[in-house]
Image (spheres, rainbow, N blue to C red):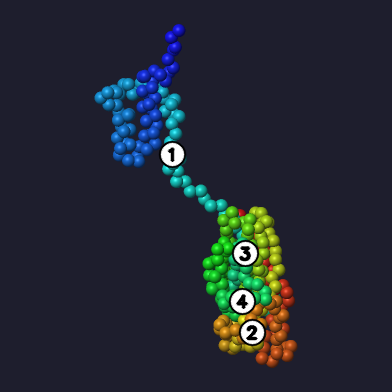
């Protein structure tokens, strides 16, 4: 018994399928270069050997195959997938009665980075913030660290009882290792800091919030003389209001929890401070809300 030839063994059909495959290929690259364009014109307009009637008949007979050709070219897919971000609103509230806060320094980072360690000397950048309220060097130093994901400065001082909210964003893939730190100077002091240092917010889901109380710390870089010449805040009006000097004269030269100010009313005659400038712990409250 003679075997019936399969359709793809028919030389006419095989020729048509071969040409159709070339059409599918060159249709995707028709504008890529002149050679592709010329080849496409050859296949669609005919040639001396294959007339237009042959090609029209072939395309009508196999239109379903043409419809199945894909316009997609995975090798040339230049689609950029947008990075998924996580956003956090960080609100700092000043809990003191008479101590304005310098512009806050806020940092998002992993647990290997921290603003400071108690019992250890302050960095020069932190000293600048603690004595003069200038956070620029501190934030620049933070941004240079590989463990830091994002940072920002507050827009200005926070008055007693006031608050400010700053939004920070990081890549969503950093959330699982996310910690934060906030540092500010109590400006009616020589070198006092209010801080929340290296706290985890990795478990915050969108819409959730966490609150933290921030203690005050003595940076250990300047003696607590409380004079108008050595403090930059408004309580020192009329004095030199000196900020950062670079000369450390505190006998400890280490960061420790601040004991509070003495004031003139409590017997420090050289002090420019009064009872209103005292504060209790905590000095600040920080609320972090994940908003995206």
Toward which corner of the image does residue 58 lie, by quadrant?
Answer: top left
Toward which corner of the image does residue 243 lie, by quadrant?
Answer: bottom right
- As rendered, which of 196 and 250 lies closer to the eye? 250
Looking at the rendered image, the quarter that the C terminus falls into is bottom right
Work out whether mark 1 precedes mark 2 in sequence or the reverse, and give the earlier one.
1
Contact (CB < 8 A) between labels 1 and 4?
no
Crowdedness near tag 1: few (<14), some (14–19) or many (≥20) residues, C-alpha within 10 Å: few
Question: For mark 2, what is the residue?
Answer: 250
- Could you give the CA–CA distance between mark 1 and mark 2, rounded to whole angstroms? 69 Å
Look at the numbered disc 4 and give the secondary structure of its residue.
loop
Work out whether mark 2 precedes mark 4 in sequence or the reverse, and give the earlier one.
4
- As rendered, which of 101 and 53 lies closer to the eye? 53
- Could you give the CA–CA distance between mark 3 and mark 1, rounded to whole angstroms? 44 Å
Q: Name the residue located 53 percent from the left edge and 67 percent from the top edge.
A: 144
Work out whether mark 1 precedes mark 4 in sequence or the reverse, and give the earlier one.
1
Look at the numbered disc 2 and give the secondary structure of its residue.
loop
Q: In the picture provided, is 80 more to the left or to the right than 93?
A: left
Work out whether mark 3 precedes mark 1 in sequence or the reverse, and give the earlier one.
1
- Could you give the CA–CA distance between mark 3 and mark 4, rounded to whole angstroms? 17 Å
Frontmost of labels 3 and 1 is 3
Look at the numbered disc 3 and give the secondary structure of its residue.
loop
Question: For mark 1, what is the residue?
Answer: 73
Look at the numbered disc 1 and give the secondary structure of its residue.
loop
């Amino acid at each position: 018994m003679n075997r019936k030839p399969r359709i793809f063994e028919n030389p006419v059909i095989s020729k048509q399928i071969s040409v159709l495959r070339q059409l599918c290929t060159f249709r995707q690259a028709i504008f890529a270069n002149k050679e592709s364009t010329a080849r496409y014109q050859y296949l669609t307009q005919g040639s001396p050997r294959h007339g237009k009637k042959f090609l029209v008949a072939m395309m009508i007979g196999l239109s379903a195959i043409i419809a199945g050709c894909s316009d997609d070219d995975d090798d040339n897919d230049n689609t950029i997938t947008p990075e998924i971000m996580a956003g956090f609103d960080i609100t700092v509230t000043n809990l003191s009665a008479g101590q304005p806060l310098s512009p806050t320094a806020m940092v998002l980072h992993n647990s290997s980075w921290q603003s400071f360690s108690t019992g250890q000397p302050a960095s020069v950048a932190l000293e600048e913030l603690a004595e003069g309220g200038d956070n620029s060097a501190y934030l620049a130093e933070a941004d240079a660290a590989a463990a830091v994901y994002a940072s920002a400065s507050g827009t200005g001082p926070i008055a007693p009882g006031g608050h400010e909210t700053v939004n920070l964003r990081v890549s969503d893939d950093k959330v699982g290792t996310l910690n934060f730190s906030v540092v500010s100077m109590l400006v009616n002091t020589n070198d006092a800091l209010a801080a929340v240092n290296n706290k985890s917010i990795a478990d915050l889901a969108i819409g959730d919030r966490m609150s933290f109380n921030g203690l005050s710390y003595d940076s250990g870089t300047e003696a607590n003389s409380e004079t108008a010449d050595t403090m930059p805040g408004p309580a020192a009006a009329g004095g030199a209001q000196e900020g950062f000097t670079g000369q450390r004269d505190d006998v400890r030269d280490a960061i420790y929890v601040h004991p509070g100010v003495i004031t003139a009313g409590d017997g420090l005659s050289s002090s420019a401070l009064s009872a209103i400038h005292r504060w209790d712990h905590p000095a600040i409250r920080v609320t972090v809300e994940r908003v995206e």
